[in-house]
Each structure stands twice: as structure tokens, then as C-alpha cells.
Amino acid sequence: MHIDLPRASRISLARVSFVALGLALSGSAFAQSPPMPPSALPAPTVAKPVDPNAIVARVDGTPITESDLAVAQEDPALSLPNTEEAQKRGILIGYVIDLKLGAKAAEAAKLGDTPEFQKRLAYLRDKLLVDEYLERETKKATSPEAARALYDETVKDMKPEDEVRARHILVTSEDEAKKVETRVKGGEDFAKVAADVSSDPGSKSEGGELGFFTKDRMVGPFAEAAFAMKPGEISQPVKSQFGWHVIQTEERRTKPVPPFDEMKEQIDQYLTRKAQQDVVLALRQNGKVQRMDQPTTATVPAPKP
């Protein structure tokens, strides 16, 4: 259920340079401003609704509106984490201004008329349209009702599972395991002995700690021994395909069926990705596609007897 299909974005060097320049300029301006004493800090204000048509700047007479800023703010290059909102807004407005100036210069140089640019423009237009189409279609499949229905279907046959938390010490021979058993049952700290002699690299540094696990996650002989003991008990040497184990069961619990709220994020991700895949498969099925790089499969007549 973890098939990430992020909305990728091509970030040009020019765009990154504009953002970096905005950061540098605004950073220097902020650095020159002396810190305000607490008494001079403005009182917090309630945010007012933003008018998308409000004009925030003009470039050679062309207005830049709040809706233009909202579109630019979706650009991953302008996420600007750990930046104060006032500084972030200043950088965003400066970036859109630079973008308009640069685009106007490129238009004057007729760069938009070249076949190469038109190809790239067509590609980016197709990509944006597909992103919007997928987003619209997947919203239909990711309703709260669909999420709840998938959860109910998934958990209807699930039952609470027994789990144990255990440590183990792994060695190569039965004689070594018996020596380990003598040491830990004689009072030596299990974790220290594990760190000293265990050959399991995954748990050795953790004192043999394996955490909680269900019976089906461990090999048969190991699981049988771990689940047969009470908390605090130590096993006799147990042989498995990995070697010889001495096991200490530390805790037992019953793992409940996970509640809906715990699984909701995973369910939403699954529904979104499945919906995206279904949309793409439907488009392929209904479209007439010819692959010129692949030979056409021809029917070869059977040879006559």
C-alpha cells in the first residue's frame, strides 16, 4: 500500500537563481534591521480573508495579484521552510516580479517562437492537465465513506494477536549455548552477555532485544520456545537454521485490531494511488495507441502437410 506517486516539478536553474537571489536580498535587509524590543512588538492580529484579485505589484503596467502569488507558492522551490511569513511573502513577490521581467525579456527576444520552446511548452501543458485530471478523478474515490468501507472490509476477518517481547543470544554450537544458559541463569545480566557473545549483528548491540513480535514472524523452534514461557523466564538452548539461541521472554500482550483513526492515513494513500492507477489503466484501455518501436505481431499461417 506504499506506492508514492508525487506531483513532480521541473525546477530550472533560472528559477532556483531567482529564489536564491530573493533570499540573499531579503536576508541582507533583515540582517540590517535592529531587533525590536518586546514592548515594541505589534499585537497579534486576526488574519483577514485574502481577495484573490487584489493587486500586490505592477510590472510595466501588468498587475500581479494575490491569485498569481498563490499559484507561485505551489512551486516546491518556493516552500522556504523555517522562514518567517513576512520574509517569505517578500521573497515570493520579488520572485514573481523577476519572473514577469524575465519572461518579458524572453518574449522580446522571440524565444517563445522557437520550435524547441513550443515542444517544451506543449509537454508542460500536457503534464499540468494530467495532474489536474488525476487530482479531480481521485477525489471521487477518496471520500470518507470509501475510506471507512475499505477499513471495514480489511478488518472484518482480523482478530487480536498474541505478541511477546523477547531477547536472545545467538551462538554457533550447543556447547556455547549451554555456557550462555549457565551464565544468564546464574545471575549475569542477559543484555550484557548478549553484547559480549551473541553473533546476531541485528540485536547484539541492543543487548539481544528483538521487540514485540507475533508467532508467525519467527522461525518455528524459536517462536515455540518464546511463546511457551512466562515473562522473565529463560529458555534452554534452542536450535534453528541460524544456530543456537538462548531466549528470555520479557513481556506478553494481545495486539488489538488497529482502530480506524490509526489506519486512516494509510487507507487514504492506498485509495489515492489505486484511483490514479485505475484512471491511467482506463485511459490506456480506451485509447488507440501504436508503438512504432515494437514489431506488430503477425499471424503466421500453419504449414501445409
Image: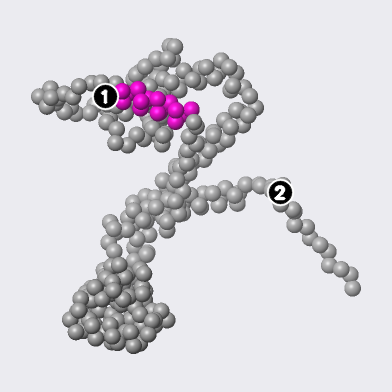
* Residue ID at (69%, 47%): 290
Residue 252 in sight from this viewpoint:
no
Q: Name the residue under label 1.
A: 31
Residue range corresponding to the magenta coloring: 14-28
Q: Horizontal placement of 88 versus 131: left or right?
A: left
Query: Label 2, label 1: how many angstroms apart (C-alpha)?
Result: 58 Å
Residue 272 in sight from this viewpoint:
yes
Q: Is the magenta stretch mostly helix, strand or loop?
A: helix
Amino acid carrying label 2: it is Asp
| Horizontal and vertical percent position of residue 122 | 58, 32
Residue 175 versus residue 55 in the image, above or below: below
Instruction: Please count the marks in the image.
Output: 2
Q: Mark 2 points at which residue?
A: 293
Pointer 2 or 1: first along the chain: 1
Q: What element carries label 2?
A: loop
Q: Horizontal placement of 131 versus 31: left or right?
A: right
* Residue ID at (58%, 17%): 109
Residue 21 image-quadrant placement? top left
> Which image quarter holds the N terminus?
bottom left
| Horizontal and vertical percent position of residue 104 | 51, 17
| Horizontal and vertical percent position of residue 35 | 18, 24
Residue 119 image-quadrant placement? top right
